Image (cartoon, rainbow, N blue to C red):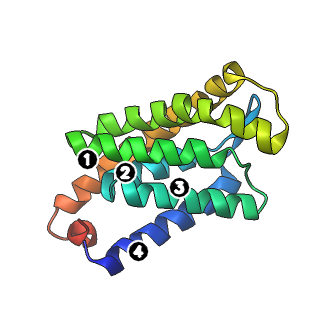
Amino acid sequence: MKKTQLMTTMAVLIAIGTVTAQLIWFPAGVARAYPMQHVINVLAGILLGPGPAVIIAFIIGLLRNLLGLGTILAFPGGMIGAFLAGYLYKRSGRKGLAVIGEAIGTGIIGALFSVPVAYLFMGSTAGAFAFVPAFLVSSIPGAIIGWFVATRITRLRTTQASPLKKIN
């Protein structure tokens, strides 16, 4: 993929992730659930790889925090999930493993990393038992939706008339 195409695709995914964060979210225990972040993580991991997926997750988290739409917990959850989704897809070529990577990366590993982050920056004494269910409630449905969208995009790329054919 050319550098301009990569940056443009990343910018579009960042814009979609940032805009949809204010539209689609719900309270989930001690955190807020943003399932569209997980959709973007899976898409970025499959379409672009682990490095760009982590950058996209970081920038979306940063923008959400600057706009008052999220918390600092967006960083460990989003970035770890995006990395694992992209890494597992890159190693296996299977979209299902990207979904599993996002769910485990955000729902379990990211939730565990969020415990000390929440304590240090938010003064929260909530433990892993509070974060893991909340993160899983957000990451699993979002990752599954991401799988459906990625499957559709890859089908479109294989058709002759698709403008997406040149990506990747």
Considering the numbered disc 2 on the image, is that residue within a helix, a strand or a loop?
Answer: helix
Q: Residues within 10 Å of mark 4 (few under 14, many from 20)?
A: few
Q: Position of residue 137 (x, y in %)?
A: 60, 29
Give the CA separation, mark 3 to mark 2.
10 Å
Q: Position of residue 73 (x, y in %)?
A: 68, 44
Q: Position of residue 71 (x, y in %)?
A: 74, 48
What residue type is disc 3 on? Ala
Q: Position of residue 160 (x, y in %)?
A: 14, 68
Residue 45: which numbered mark, if any?
A: 2
Residue 65 seen from this side:
yes
Front one among 147 and 93? 93
Residue 7: which numbered mark, if any?
A: 4
Q: Which residue is mark 1?
A: 90
In the rendered structure, which disc, 3 or 4, sits on the residue that comes first in sequence? 4
In the rendered structure, which disc, 3 or 2, sits on the residue that comes first in sequence? 2
**In the current view of this chain or complex, which residue is farthest to the top?**
129
What residue type is disc 1 on? Lys
Residue 82: which numbered mark, if any?
A: none
